[in-house]
Image (spheres, rainbow, N blue to C red):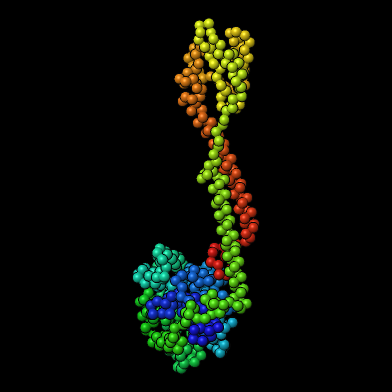
Amino acid sequence: MADSTGTPCDAVLYRWAPAWGLPSISVPCLQVEAYLRLGKVAFAVQDCAAPSASPTGQLPALDTSADLVGAHAAVSGSAPPPLAEFAAARQLIDYLKRKVVDLDRGLTASQRAEAAAYAALVEAKLQPALVFTTWCEAGPYGAHTRPAYGAGLPFPLSRLAPRAARAAALRHFGGEGAAAAVYGGAAEALDALGARLAATTSGDYFFGGQPSSLDALLYGCLAYLRSAPVVHPQLGARLGAHRSLGAYVERLSGVAFEAPAPAAADAELDWSAWGAAADDKYSKARTEKESELQRKGRRWLLCAGAAIAAYVFLSGQYLQLQLGGFEFEEEEEEEDATVAHSACCPISSRGAPAPRALPPSPSSRRLAVRPRASGEGGGDVDEAWRRFQRRSGFKLPEVERQNVRTQAPPRFTNRSGEWNSGPTGDQLRRQERAVLDAWTQALQLQLAAGGTIVVVLLLLFAAGGPPSDARCTLPWC
């Protein structure tokens, strides 16, 4: 594993992009990079415009040929994003101490205890002050923080993402009113560190001639205090009051940061996503996880698409089922029609036609009136009409008293004598259609609900559980 110059490359560090004269705009990223440089670990860097560009969804992150470090800090941290980065940096440094190089291996027991005490002081007092001055101060945030963190993001994310981080930091600290207490604790920490470094008579590092993890922790904070334009004047003045702190930063910058780190895209990393080949066991294991993530992702998309399609087709809101019109078949043959006409429409003594028997209503499907003619004068017409009414349930509307034998109800016939073609006929058809649509629509909704539930359950059973991968940043991962 080598970069373009032939130097071995053992890891890829995902970090925030450089800004303000610093290798990275983030203090935690500076701390991890300082540890890698002080430990003389060959690494490449990948500058990210947002945490989502990291395979862990968190910055900083470290990718080696065996492990991907920083994933657990991304999913388990409850602190706001600016403070959660310090948890990720601590996890990365712990990993490097256990599996790559331990900078504290040469310290004595008393030095280890002293390093732990000062590290706790930095984490409790100095790091929160750096987060507060970067994100919670309105002036520096609008002038420097938001433009720097949103530079690599498209609009409107360039404004929304920094605003969300600032809101989370303000909620954590309880508003801008906590500035006095936060800066007071940071000033005390700087005084203690300045006095301790002033007592160091030899060597470039905190404990003399050997670097330690405390040096990486301190360098990230002090370099940021010296170069970042967002630092509160109170902190800047306290840093300037201790010459030992400034000299310490200068020494470490000259020792460890004299040359920029190679970019991951320019390095020849056989095991990484930027390499042309991936033939070691760790890379194959990660490739299999990525393949599983893609397969399950496609299945879940299929489930969502099927649920939407089931709703569209079964709900009836977007695709209406066309109900064909009812056809009324005339069962009367030509002979029956002649008999019915002679029976229902006999010629009266005055030459006027007797009232015609009305056809069956639409509610009586395929029901025909077939009265018998039992002699001249049509004596059985009234009885046939009563039988028709009983069988069909048809009733005449209330009309003025008139001779129904010589005049048909005017509300049911037009000038051409066609039945059910006037305003009353249209009203009947509309009422029937409304009833049918209401019943059909309720049934469609029931079918849609049941069908959608069944389809979704079947597809979820076929798709299996949600994907689980340390690199997945989706809510279910």
- The extreme front residue here reads 334
* Residue 143 figure quarter: bottom left
Judging depth in this view, the residue of 109 and 454 nearest the camera is: 454
Where is residue 297 drawn, in percent x and y?
57, 62
The answer to whether residue 25 is seen in the rendering is: yes
Q: Is residue 195 left or right of residue 328?
A: left
Which residue does the image show at 50% across and 17% down from the upper left? 409
Q: Is residue 402 left or right of residue 19?
A: right
Where is residue 385 drawn, in percent x and y?
59, 16
Where is residue 38 drawn, in percent x and y?
50, 86
Q: How many marks?
A: 0
Where is residue 412 drawn, in percent x and y?
50, 21
Which residue does the image show at 53% across and 71% down from the upper left? 56
Judging depth in this view, the residue of 114 and 463 nearest the camera is: 463
* Residue 255 figure quarter: bottom left
**Quarter holding the C terminus?**
bottom right
Which residue does the image show at 52% across and 78% down from the upper left? 12
Q: Is residue 65 left or right of residue 181?
A: right
**Quarter holding the N terminus?**
bottom right
Establish if 451 lies above or below 342.
Answer: below
